[in-house]
Structure formats: structure tokens, C-alpha cells
Image (tube, rainbow, N blue to C red):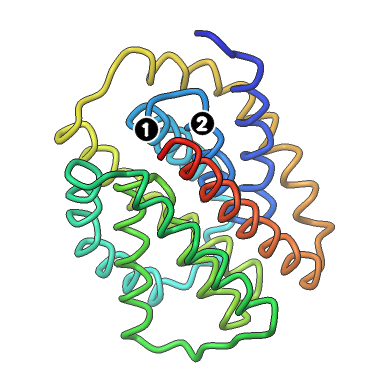
Amino acid sequence: MENILPFLCIILVATVLQTSTGFGFSIMATPLLLTLFLPQEAIQINIILSLFISILFIWKISTDIDFILLKRFIIGSIVGVPFGILIFISININTFKIGVSVLLLLLTFMLSVNFRVKPTPIRDLIVGGLSGLLTTSIGMPGPPLLLYFTGTNTEKGKLRATTLAFYLFIYFISLISQIIFTGTNKLIWESSLYAIPIVFLGLFIGQIIFKRLNQEIFKIFTYILLSFTGIYLLIESLIHK
């Protein structure tokens, strides 16, 4: 595989962020992997490694999971997944990424000025649906969850645990859906295999960072992640439009 060093660096940074914040892998990895792989390949590599990380890590933090909230996210995502597949196979993915990038930047601004939203069962379902849609369309379930949890001022341990538990479900369903509707190839699975040792390293580093993060620094991380993703997606999409 060409560009092996940039690929492994992306995986390391994304895994560290995933472990320390609960969101970093898909938000960081997917936009950068799109510079090295075709959209289908980048999305499936992201899904495979994210699922692997969730399986490895979830048992350590299972006591912090909000199971009622998790159930609502899963129900909502079941509705969103087929729409995401439809978007991926029928709509210009560049146009869709531009829309996502603008939305991310707008909502990042709202959060930075202390935007707040009250959690309700209906909103839980909507967030789950949006996350399911974004997973199968662009491989990024994190932004709706991140915005919602930050807007509701959720404690970081509960945020991370509930998100990872949800990822176990949504990434598995999304991977199966991607393979059925768009296929897969050898490069995707070989690249994922090469990345596994780096994932273990990132998990170790990220766990150390997580223990040292206070809530305010954690919020700053969320803003940086969202801003980076929004700006990068917008620039990358406009260049290749």
C-alpha cells in the first residue's frame, strides 16, 4: 500500500483522540483517509477500525453506560442507516460533504457561545437517526452525538461510555450495509490489518490523556475537533468539486 506512513500517523492520532474523548476516531480519520483512499475504502477502513476499538475498550467503561439513552440512539439509528446508504449510492458525495461541513461549523459556533439544549426522548431518537445516517453515508457517526452531549453538558465518562456502546451497534450494522450495497475489496482489509498495532498504541496513550483531562479542557477538544472537521471537509470538497 502506498502512503503507509501518513496512513499509520492518521490512525495513531485518531485512536488517541477516540480513547481520550470518545469521538475522535471517525471525526479525525475519515476526512484525512479520503485524501489517501477512495470514499468507499476510506469509510469502510474507518468503520472496521472504529468497531475494533469499541470492542477492545467497551468492557473497561461499561459501568458508565446510560442504557436508556443508548436504547433510544439505537432505535433512531435503525431509521437513519438506510437513508445514509441511499445518499452514498445515489447523491454526489462532494455536495453532501459540503452541507455537512457548513452544518458542523455553524453548530460549533453555537456551542462555543454556550448553546444549550434540553435532552428529551424525541431528541435522543433524532440524534440517533442522524448518527446512523452519517455513519453509512460518510462514516462519521460522531458529530450529532458530540453536539448533543456537549449541548446537554453531559459528564465526560458517561459521554464516552454511551458513545462507544452505541458505536458497537452502529458500526456493525453500517459495515454490513456497506458491504451488501457497495461491496468491499482486499485493500480495505489489508490496510485495516496493518493499522491494528498502531491502534493498540493509540489506546494506551489515549487512556493516559483521558485521566488527566478536566471538563473544561474536554470541551475545548470538542470545539477543535468539530472546527477541524468542518473546515477540512469544506476545503477538500470545494477543491474536488
Checking the image for residue 39, the label placed there is 1
Are discs 2 and 1 less than 8 Å apart at CB? Answer: no
Residue 174, position in %: x, y? Answer: 28, 45
Question: Marks 2/1: CA distance?
Answer: 8 Å
| Residue at position x 37%, y 26% in the image | 41
What x and y, as percent, mark residue 199? 61, 30
Residue at 60 percent across and 75 percent down: it is: 150
Q: Amino acid at mark 2?
A: Leu
| Relative image position of residue 161 (x, y in whole percent) | 54, 61
Q: Is residue 34 left or right of residue 198?
A: left
Mark closer to the chain start, 2 or 1: 2
Q: Residue furthest right?
A: 212
- Residue 17 appears left or right of 178: right
Q: Identity of the amino acid at label 1?
A: Pro
**Residue corresponding to mark 2:** 33
Image quarter in which the C terminus is found: top left
Foreground pick, 167 / 92: 92
Q: Quadrant of residue 45?
A: top left
Q: Residues within 10 Å of mark 2 (few under 14, many from 20)?
A: many
* Residue drawn at 55 percent across, 71 percent down: 106
Q: Is residue 103 above or below residue 68?
A: above
Return the mark for residue 224: none
Who is closer to the viewer here, 212 or 91?
A: 91
Residue in the picture at 69% in, 83% down: 113
Determine whether the residue tagged by mark 1 lies in a helix, strand or loop: helix
Could you tell me residue 121's position as x and y percent?
34, 86
Q: Secondary structure at mark 2?
A: helix
Q: How many numbered discs?
A: 2
Q: Is residue 65 above or below residue 85?
A: below
| Mark 1 Cα-neighbour bin, 10 Å: few <14, some 14–19, many ≥20 | some
